[in-house]
Structures are given as structure tokens and as C-alpha cells.
Amino acid sequence: MTVFGRRVGPAQLGTPAVLQGLPRLPWVWGLVGAVALIAAATVGVLAGPVHIGVGTVIQTLIAPIPWFGHRTLAADSSQASILWSLRFPRVVLGAIVGGMLATAGAAYQGVFRNPLADPYLLGAAAGANLGATLAIAFAPGSSLIGVNVVPLAGFAGAAAAVAGAYVLGRTVTGLRNATGLILAGVAIAAFLNAVQTYIQQSQPSTIRQVYSWILGRLVTAGWDGVWLVLPYVAISIVVIFLHRRLLDALSVGEEEVNSLGISARRVRLIVVVAATLGTAAAVAIAGTIAFVGIIVPHTIRLLVGRSYRVVIPLSILFGAAFLVLADTAARTVAAPAELPIGVITALVGAPFFIVVMRSTRAAEL
Amino acid sequence: MSEVVLSGVSIAYESDVVVSDFSLNIGSGEWIALIGPNGAGKTSILRAISRLVAYTGEIRIGNAAVTELGGRELARLVAMVLQSPHVPAGMTVSQYVLLGRSPHLTYFGKEGRRDQGIVAGILERLSLERLAARPVEHLSGGERQRAAIARALAQQAPVLLVDEPTSSLDVGRQQDVLELIDGLRAEQGLTVIAAMHDLTLAGQYADRLALLVAGKLVAVGAPSEVLTEPAIADHYQAQVRVLQMNGSGRAVIPVRAHAASKSEDLGEGV
């Protein structure tokens, strides 16, 4: 047969050859992401009501290093205290939460094949808001095993809402496709939002506190918040990262991916559980910060490429950098007052995203 | 080894029975075409063999029952080309075809140089190497069909299921695709099971035709036995002339009822 030109026998099919057109993480973008994160962290550490110089920051950072740190000049102890107890943990927390929300958003968009999916799609935000509202309204100031009850309630609410959506989705459609799960998430979120609004309105004295929680902020609770979320976020990001090939595979559609020997349902379950775990931890400590999970992955898709082998690692870096910058803006533009970080992510993020969309290949979204 | 045996297979979507008590033995290296009117159950049978739909009865590939195999094991035995494959946005032809290596990878596995080499060889065989770095969505219909076949070949499965391989292709591309499948069958000893709506092409390429009507097998045999005017008139409710062509099988030609007299110049039907 000569219709397609040269004949290549099966014996030759195994011969190695260079294959063009495979997604590779462009090292330039990896570098840009790392530099962006370092730059954002630097700005975040330097910005604040008390002026602290770069030299002091570096001295303070290396001071605890054994054999090396103690030989350098000790920084002013009050400045060191500001850095260690306020600014460093806040920047680290911002990076963790931002990286997590962006990665979870990318993962949700992959498993649901839906560009509008964000980490809150299955009711995580509504559940967290309800949990936190209940804690603020009925158990103000209380703590459980030494931890403030509000983030615990937020975490439990988010996890319970997504679990509820999953169970509901399974009973309705048997999870044959993702649509049933999304609809179940919409129903659960609507219901929980209604309950949350009712409780909020019936407890007018706590409205301000509840609103501030919902709009999101990075608490200045020192390193406790970091240690609280880090294990969940680390597990979540590692699991999602390991799924980047399978997330690419899911883009060919449910039936085709199953015919390739990959269980779309299993991939979806594992990724949703992982993303929910990390998202629940992030919203528990930082409130429901909007937009990060949508604009960061989509900006990467527009600028670099759509493969999850590129989108996932870059979402971690750029999500972290973006939220550290947004938080720095939130606590400086109206100082001494602090703006909710969700306001900044939307106010700055949305126009930026529109510019990126207009100037790139938006048709490929 | 790659013999496919279906015994008493029935398929239902909820309470709608679409295939009932279907039995057929397909020999290793054979090309069998499933033909029949729309809704006869051709695609459902392909879906059952690749376990995309639940069924009763038994389907065996070689020595193994399809239900006893793991997902990856099955995908190493059976590759399927869907009628209208989903075109993922922004995915290059290389990436798309490389997905066919999934059954040979572990859950968290990554394609290695060997997988890339196999895919490069397939792209060359299918004259797709020039398009390797191009997004699948930028390809023409015929090129997309070839990319879908390339992905199935990357699975290196001995059984190839093809659902309406020529729909939406022009006559030249139809021949290209069918010649390609036939050439690969000869080279690699593939067993080909294809749902086909074009009866002439089915008769030209398949060793045997299995005629399905309303989920039941009504005839199976060589094209010369199955493609007869009475059988087609009966099962398709179509007026056709079937012409024996020298060395090129049978041509099934639709005839307009009120212009039947004009068809005399088509010659003697069979």
C-alpha cells in the first residue's frame, strides 16, 4: 500500500526517534515563577508600618543558622521579633494558601473539564463559611485542643460540604460523568449559603466579623497558622502534582480515557479529595479568597501552554507569588486599616486577566 | 491469540434493550464489519467489547473474559477508535498519540524514551510526523481520523475496534483510511471489528459482514452472501441495486423509487 507513502514495518515501530510537539516545562517560565515568588516575598517582608531594611532582614534570617548565624551581628531584637512573629509567617502563609488555591483550581478545571471550575465548585466555600459563621456566632473565642475553633469549624464545614456533594452526586447519577457532581455541588452550596445567611442575619452583632472572614484575610497568628495548614497543603499539592499526566489524559473525554485503561472516575475521586483537603485547610485559615483558583491557572494556559505538566508546577509558583503580593497590597494601601485580601485579588486580578485574555490566544481557552 | 468470541451478549440502556443474544466468533487477523440500519446496535457491541457499557453474556478475547481483565490489561488487548473522537483544546498530535501508551504505564508512570520511539514510528507510518507538533484541533477531518487511529495503534493491542471510520470523510479520504487499516492489519496481524454504514466499502474491505437489525444478528457471512438486494430491501427498507464488479467486490447503489426505470442502464443486479 502506498497511499500514505513510505511503508514502515512493525519491527521498526520500536526504534527510538525524536518526537516533536511534547509539552516541556519551559525553564524560562520556571525561573520567572521562582523569581516572581522571591520578589513578592521580599516586598511582603519589607512592607509594613515599621521600616526594616534589607540588611536587617538578611541578618535576621541567617541568625538562627548554627556556626554561621551567631557570628554575624545580631539584628535589633524588636525588629527581629516583628519579622519572625509577624512578617515571615504571614508571607509564608500567603505563599502556601496562594499556591494551594491556584493548584486546586487548575486540578478542578482538569477533572471537570470546565474552565469556570474553581476550588469552591463543590461547596467548599459555602461549607467553610457556614462552619466559621456557626463558630463565630455561637462559640466566640473558644478553642479546641489549643486551636481557635473558627478555622477548625471552617475546615470541617468545607470537607463536609464536598463529601455531601460527592455522596449526593453518586446517588443521583452514579458518577458516570462529572455533571451530576457539579450539580450536586451547586445544590449543596446554595443550601449552605442560605443557612449561613440566616444565621448571620439572626446574629447581627457578629456580621462584621463574619464578613471579614468570608472576604478572606491572612491572620497574623504567627507560625501556628502555617503549621496548621502545611501538612494538608503539602499532601494535596504532591498528589495533584503526581496526577499531571492523568489530568492531560482526561481532556480527551470520559469514554476515550476509559478505553485507554484509565478510570476517569478514580482519577476524579483522588484529585477531588486531594484538592478539597488542601482547599479546606487554606480557607480555614485564610477565608474564602476568590479568583486565585481561576485567574492564575488560566493566565498560565494563555501565556505558556495548556498541558497540566506545565500548568500545575507553574500554578504553585505563580499562585504563591500572586497571593503574597495581594496580601502585601491589602495591608498597605489603606494602612493602618487592612483591606480584605479577596477585594485585592478581584480588583487587581480581574483587570489583569482581561488584559492577558485580550492580548493572547483567548480563542484557545 | 486475538480471537474475539461473543456468546449470548445482550446490552440494555436502563430498560431499553439494544442488543439481544448476540453471538459471533471473530478469528484472529480477521476483518469483520458490523452492518445494519441506524440504531441496530453496532456501536453498542463495540462498546461492550471495550467494556464501556455493561452487558450480559460473555465476551472473550483470546483466553480471557473481558470482565475478568483490569482496565489497563483490557486496553492492551483492545484499542478503539470512536466515531467522533473528542478533540482536546491545545493538545498536539504527539501528545494525543502518546496517550495511547497509557495502558503500558503505571498509574503515576511517565512515558519514557521507548514510548516516544514507538509513537514516532507510528506517526511516520501514518504520515503524521510532519503534523507532530500541530494542535489536533487544527487538523482536517481525514488527518484527525488518522491521529485517532495512530493513538489506537500506540496501544499495541491486537484487536482494533473502529466505529464508522469513514463517516464525514470524502471518498478519497475514505479509501485512504480503509487502505491504512487494511495495511496495518496485514503487517501486524490485527483483528479488526468495524461498524460500517457504507455497504460497498464494507463489502470491499471486510472478510465477513455481520448484519444486525434491531439488536439481533440476522445474517453473517462473506459479502457475496450478505449483500443481496432482497436482504437490503428487507432490512434497510431501501431500494438498491447490487452490482458485481470485476475483482472489486459488490457495489450497493441506492435507486430512487420513481426513477426505477432509469436504473436499467446500471446493468444486472444480484
Image (tube, grey):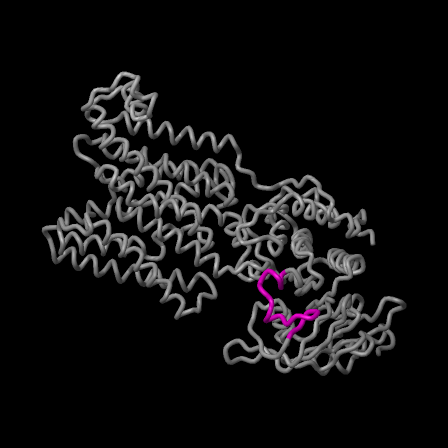
Res A341 → quadrant: top left
Asked whether residue A364 appears in the rendered view, the answer is no
Work out whether residue B64 or residue A363 is closer to the camera in this orientation and state it: B64
Work out whether residue B5 or residue B181 is closer to the camera in this orientation and state it: B5
Please provide the residue range marked out in magenta: B59-75
Q: Is residue A181 above or below residue B133?
A: below
| Rendering coords of residue A43 (x, y %) | 31, 27
Which residue is the extreme one toward the front?
A67
Residue A358 horizontal side relative to residue A342, left or right: right
Residue A72 horizontal side relative to residue B230, left or right: left
| Rendering coords of residue A2 (x, y %) | 82, 51
Residue at image point 57% right, 67% down: B52
| Rendering coords of residue B255 (x, y %) | 76, 74
Residue at image point 75% right, 59% down: B181
Q: Is residue A281 above or below residue A168?
A: above
Res A261 → quadrant: bottom right
Task: Please tell me whether residue A357 belongs to the stretch shown in magenta.
Answer: no
Residue A214 horizontal side relative to residue A178, left or right: left
**Quadrant where the N terminus of chain B lies?**
bottom right
Q: Is residue A357 above or below residue B175?
A: above
**Quadrant where the C terminus of chain B lies?**
bottom right
Residue A237 horizontal side relative to residue B9, left or right: left
Residue at image point 67% right, 44% down: B131
Res B74 → quadrant: bottom right
| Rendering coords of residue A346 (x, y %) | 31, 41
Asked whether residue A107 appears in the rendered view, the answer is yes
